[in-house]
Image (cartoon, rainbow, N blue to C red):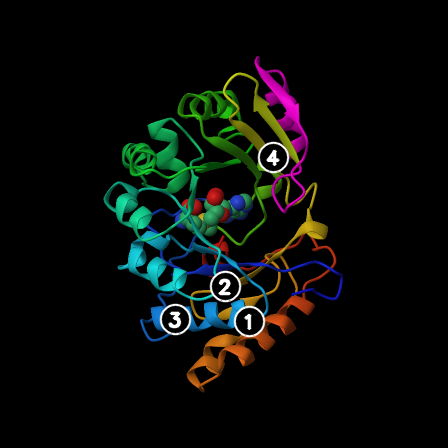
Amino acid sequence: MIDQFGRDITYLRISLTDRCNFKCLYCMPGDPLDRLSRDEILSFDEIVKIVEGATTVGINKFRLTGGEPLVRKGVPELVGMINQVRGVQSTVMTTNAALLREHAQALYDGGLERLNISIDSLREDRFREITKGGQLGPVLEGIDAALAAGFQGTKLNAVIMRGFNEDEIEDLVAFARNKNLELRFLERMPFNSAHDNWDEAFMPVSEIYDRVSRIEGLIPEEPDRTGGPAMMYRFEDIGCRIGFIGALSEPYCERCNRLRVSSIGTIRSCLVDGGELDLRQAIRNGAQPEQIGKMLQVAANLKPLTHSKKQTVQMSHIGG
Ligand SMILES: C[S@@+](CC[C@H](N)C(=O)[O-])C[C@H]1O[C@@H](n2cnc3c(N)ncnc32)[C@H](O)[C@@H]1O
C-alpha cells in the first residue's frame, strides 16, 4: 500500500494491551492509568479481522506490542491465529522479557518469528528505578529462554538517558556481544510520562554513536535502508550488530513503512503525530476485510511527510 508520499506501507504494529508489568519512567504516566475495561480492548478475533483487512492492502508484517504483550493471556495462540491468515509473512513481538521464560517456547512453537527485547540497564538497582520496581533477573532469564527456544535474530533495545544510564553504553554493547545479539540504542522520545524533564535527559544518538565508535573490534556498516536504523556497527569477528535509532534528532520518516493499532482499535498513522481512525467501531459494526483495508489506506494517507517533535500522548496507549 503506497501512501501519498510514495512510501510502501507493509508493516502493522498491534498493541495487545495498555497494561504493563513495568512502569518505565519515560513511558508510563506519573498518575495511575485509567484501566481500560475488557470490552474496550480488542478481542483476539477482532485482531485477526484487522490482520485479514491489512493483508488486502499488502501489509504482511505484524508486530505485537503493548503495554506488555505478554501480560495478556493466550498470546502464543494469537500468534498461531495470525499466521494462518493468507498473506501474513511474519509476526514478531516487542517485549520487556519479564514473562518470557514461561512463554518463549510456546511463542516459538506458535510461529513467532522474532523478538525485540527492551533492556535499559544491567544493574539491578538502576533497573528497578527505571522500571519502577521491575526485576532484572527474570528479564535476563527471559533472554536466555528466547535463545534456548530457538529464536534467531533477537534484538535488544536500550533507551539511553543522560544522567540515568549513559554510563552503561559500553556494558550494554559487551552484553550484546556476549550473547551475540543485535543491540539498538534508542533516543528517548518526549512522551507524556512520569519523568517530564525529558530534555535534560535527552541524549542524541550522535553522542551514543561517538561513544560506541571508540569500542575496540567494531567496524561501521552500510546503513539498513529497509526501515531499520540508519547507522550500524558490527563486531568484525562475530558479526553481531549495534544500531542507533534517533527518532528525534535523525528522524527516518522517509523510510517509515508502518501503521499502528492501539489496544482499543484506534489506527494511528504516526507515533508522534498524524491522524487516527476508529477501527474497533467499524469491526463491531461488521466491517469486512476490504473495508478494513480501505480504512488502513486512509490512515496511511494521514501519515505526515516528517513528524513534528512534540508529543503529548502516552506510549503505553499507542503501543511502542
Ligand atoms: C512501549 S514498549 C512496549 C513493549 C514492551 N513492554 C517492551 O518493553 O518492549 C516498546 C518500546 O518502546 C520504548 N519506549 C517507550 N517509551 C519511550 C520513549 N519515551 N522514548 C523512546 N522509547 C520509548 C521502550 O523502551 C520499548 O523498547
Query: Which of the 4 image quadrants contains residue 209?
Result: top right
Q: In the rendering, which numbered label is found on residue 131?
A: none
Q: Which residue is mark 4?
A: 244
Q: Residue at x 40, y 60 (%)?
A: 83
Specify which label sits upstream in the sequence, 4 or 2: 2
In the rendered image, the vertical position of residue 74 relative to residue 290, given as above or below: above
Compared across the picture, whether 318 is left or right of 144 comes to right
Q: Secondary structure at mark 3?
A: loop
Q: Which residue is mark 2?
A: 87
Q: Residues within 10 Å of mark 4 (few under 14, many from 20)?
A: many
Q: Residues within 10 Å of mark 3 (few under 14, many from 20)?
A: many
Circles 3 and 1 in contact, beta carbons < 8 Å: no
Q: Which residues are magenta?
A: 203-230
Percent from the top left, x then y, of residue 282? 49, 82
Circles 1 and 2 in contact, beta carbons < 8 Å: yes
Q: Which residue is mark 3?
A: 42
Specify which label sits upstream in the sequence, 3 or 1: 3
Percent from the top left, x then y, of residue 207? 65, 27
